[in-house]
Amino acid sequence: MITALLAALSVGLLQGFLHCAGMCGPFTLAFSLNLPRNTPNAAHPIRWIALHNGGRILGFTLLGTMFGLLGSFVDLAGKTAGVDGVAGLIGGTLMMIWAVQQLRTGHALKGLERFSPITHPRLKPWLHQMTLARTNLSSFLSGVLLGTHPCGLLFAMLLGAAAAGAWWRGGLTLLAFGVGTVPAILTIALAGFYGRRRLQGRWATYLSAALIGLSGLLFALRGLSVNGLVPDINPWLF
């Protein structure tokens, strides 16, 4: 589990300036640019940005918890059929498939963005209103909604949450990923980083795909080991 959390945190850090800056950056920048520059309390904009990011991380964590719970049901069904660690086998295999596709194309499952709730005709105006409201609650809720914005990278992390086989492990996995993205997103919000300078090159994308693929391999091996199909693996890996 420790290895999976470190991998999730590393992916968030690596892809924050590459993927998340382009995916969530425009929404975060729009939010920060709409904040008043002259307020009676200069701490208000900073607090709103912090709440916005906190909501985004909570959105990730809630999704991870849901997928971890789904994985626990899959494991329960597997035990009924006499097979343990089914979630790890399925989720880990899908993570490795995603990693291979990401290495080949650089944008695995890119089409998921079309299903984003923040572009839904009914939710989009609501998000716009919350962006302009400039309150603690609106800042937080707009961040939660942004955290549900789907993409191939997030889907890969959710596969890891499902493969973890427990709701709390899934939540922790996406929490670690969300925390990892904070430096990039805060840079965008505080300095208008997006559109001026972004890290270039595919090396971080390849490294992130390798980390996700390795995590998938470990989850799959865990599923095999609990069924006695391969030798036991050191438990600290999970």
Image (spheres, grey):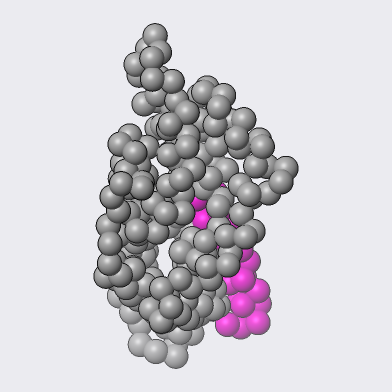
- Look at the magenta stretch and give its main secondary structure: helix
For the C terminus, which image quadrant? bottom left
Q: Residue at x 41, y 73 (%)?
A: 106
Asked whether residue 74 is drawn in magenta, I would say yes
Residue 147 or residue 92, whichever sits in front: 147
Asked whether residue 155 is drawn in magenta, I would say no
Residue 145 location, x and y as percent?
57, 43
Residue 173 or residue 19, whichever sits in front: 19
| Image: magenta residue range | 59-83
Work out whether 35 lies above or below 183: above
Q: How many marks?
A: 0
Q: Residue at x 46, y 58 (%)?
A: 169
For the N terminus, which image quadrant? bottom left
Q: Residue at x 44, y 87 (%)?
A: 228
* Residue 222 falls in image quadrant: bottom left
Outermost residue, front direction? 196
Work out whether 181 lies above or below 47: below
